[in-house]
Image (tube, helix red, strand yellow):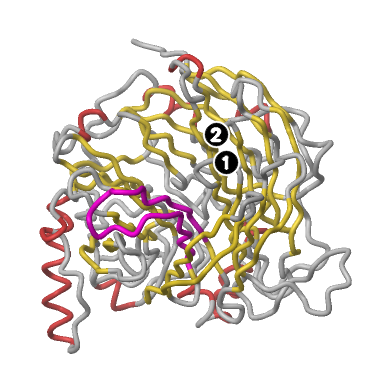
Amino acid sequence: MGVIRRTVLPAIAAVATVAAGVAAIPGSVAAGAPDEPKDPALARDIGDPITPGPCTDESAEQQYVHGEGHDHQGMPLHRKSCGIEQSSFQPLDDVMDDELLGEMDAENGIAAVAVTYPQAGVLFFDISDPSNPKFLSRYESAECEGAAIDVDCGAYVDLSEDGTAAYLAQQQISVLPGRVPDSDAPLPAQPGVEVIDITDPTDPQQSDFAMIAPLDGGSHTTRSHVIPEGFSPDAVPGEYLFSMDNGGGIRIDRVNKAEDGSRTLEEINTIPTDEIHDSFIANDPIDNRVYLYLASGFDTGFLVWDVTNPAQEKLVGEWDPSPQCEEDWYAHTIDVTYRGDRRYVTVPAELFTISGEQSADDRAEGCGRVAGNGDKVGPLWIVDASDFSRLGPADAQDTDAEEATTDAELRRNSLDAIVSTWTNAASRAGGNLTFSPHNQQIVGDKIYLSGYHSGVTVLDASQAFNGKEGARPKELAFVVPSGTPTRPLYQQTVGPVIPFVTTFSQARPLIWDQVYYQPPGAGPDEGRILVADMTGGFYSYRETGKGR
C-alpha cells in the first residue's frame, strides 16, 4: 500500500477535492491515449506481441474483468482461476467482523496476517500443514485515526526468522493519533513498531514498543534480518530490525533476545532518506556484503546501502527509469534473486489516481497525466543490478545543472539495466489500485504477485533471470479468490475529511498480499500459496502445473 506522503501531506485540500470525485472502484479509468508517447521504461513490452504462457490467454480474458455495469462486488463473477486449485478456505467470520486484512509473512510453521484497518493487529495461523492452516490467535492493537484520513495503521507485519516473534509496523498520515481500545492508558496510541512475543502463538504478548515519528507518519514497513556469524570479516552479526520511518529515514535496531525468548529493541542507527516504502535485506553471495534495498515510492525507483555493519551504512547504488518525473511511477515492493554472478532486482509500480494530475512541467516531460499513473498499465521491472556502479550515480547534487546531469545519467543507466518488464495480459489500466501490481515474492524462477482485484498471478521469469533481454515473464497460473461466506464490507459511519481506504476497499475480492510457503524438508508438491483477502477470508492454494 502506498504511503503517498508527498501528495497527501503537502496538498491536503487538493487531494480532498480529487478524492471526493473518485469512484470507489475507479477501474474505469482509461489507459493512456493512443497518441501518448511510449514510456521508455515500458517500451520493450507495451505494444509488442506477448509470447503466451500456459495461462496467459485465460488471464487476459478472465482475470481483469471490467466494463460498464460490471459489479466489482459480485463474488461469483470473479471466481476465475487457471493452473491453481483451492486446498482450503477459512471465511474468518467467526474471528473478525468488517476489519480489513493486509500484509503477510510466514516462517517456521507460523503465518502472520496484519489487521490493517480500522484497528491494527495480527492474526496468527499454524501452517505446519500449509494445505490446511489452523487459526491460532488474534493480537489486537491500537485503533486507526479515521477522522482526518482513513489510512491503514496496521501497516505491515514481519516474523523473526525462527517464527517466535512478530514485528508490527503502525503508521498514520495525519497528525491525529488513534486510541488504545478498552484501555485505561492516559495517552492515545502513537505510531511506531510493536514487538510481539509469539513463543506461545496462541497467546501473543507485546514485549517492546518503539515510537517512531509520531507527528510525521509512524512506520510503514519493518523487516527483521539476521547477519550470521563469520559472514564477512567486518560484519557485525546478530538480529536487526529495519523500520521505515515515514518521516524520512530508516531506523535500525539491534534486537536483543532474553532467556525467556522475549525481544527488545536497541536503536543503533538512522539512515536519512527522502521517501520510503518497502525494503529487502540480503546477505549477498556475490560480494559477501549485507545489502539493504529500498523501494522509494515517488522519490526514486530503488536505493541500495551496504549495511554489513548496520551502524555504519554506505550508499552504493540507485535505480530510477524516470528521475525527471516527480509523481509518475510509485516504486512499491522489492525483491532480489541471484544466478551465478548476476544479481536481479524485481520492482513493481503501484498504480492509483487519488492524488490528482501531475504538474504541467512533468506532463511536458512525458511523465504522464495522473499522479500515480493509474491511467496506465502497471509494470513489474526486472533489473540487472550485478554491478551497482553501473546504476546510479546515487549521490545528490548541489545545483540544478548538476542535478540535471545526474538525472540524465541515472535515467540512461537505469533504462539500460532493465532486463524485462511485465505488464498484465489484458493490458488493463490500474485505476485507483483496482488492477495494480502490489506485493511480490521470488521463489526459484517464479514470481508470486498480488494484484488487489485481480487476485494472485504466478509468473515464470526463468528467461529474464537468465539474462534474456526483453523476455516478458509468462503467466503460469492465476486465481481470483472468491470464497463464501464473506465478511461485511467496512462502512465508516462518518466519512473522513480525506478518504483513502474507503476509496478502494469496496470490492470483492481485494488481495493485498500472498506468501508461498513450503515446510522445511517438504517437497514442492507440499508447498502452498497462502492468500489473505482484505474483505474476505484466508486461502490455501495448490499449483496444478497446467501445461499447453
The location of residue 138, given as percent across then percent down, is: 76, 45
Quadrant hosting residue 104: top right
The C terminus - image quarter: top left
Image position of 319 with respect to 347: above or below: below
Image position of 168 with respect to 335: above or below: below
**Amino acid type for the residue under numbered disc 2:** Asn
Q: Earlier in the sequence, mark 2 or mark 1?
A: 2
Quadrant hosting residue 127: top right
Which sits in the foreground, 422 or 383?
A: 383
Q: Looking at the rendered structure, which numbered label has been put on residue 108?
A: 2
Q: Is residue 227 left or right of residue 91?
A: left
Q: Looking at the rendered structure, which numbered label has been put on residue 163?
A: 1
The location of residue 429, given as percent across then percent down, is: 42, 47
**Amino acid type for the residue under numbered disc 1:** Gly
**Outermost residue toward the bottom?**
399
| Crowd class of label 2 (few under 14; some 14 to 19; many from 20; radius 10 Å) | some
Q: Secondary structure at mark 1?
A: loop
The location of residue 147, given as percent across then percent down, is: 74, 73
| Crowd class of label 1 (few under 14; some 14 to 19; many from 20; radius 10 Å) | many
Residue 226, magenta (yes or no): yes
Q: Is residue 158 left or right of residue 97?
A: left
Which sits in the foreground, 95 or 168?
A: 168
Residue 398 in view in this figure: yes
Segment colored magenta: 221-244
Residue found 15% across the figure and 60% down from its top? 391
Label 2 to label 1: alpha-carbon separation: 5 Å
Residue found 63% across the figure and 49% down from its top? 261
Q: Is residue 500 left or right of residue 55?
A: right
Q: Looking at the rendered structure, which numbered label has been put on residue 209?
A: none
**Outermost residue toward the front?**
259
Residue found 46% across the figure and 70% down from its top? 251
Q: Are marks 2 and 1 in contact (CB under 8 Å)?
A: yes
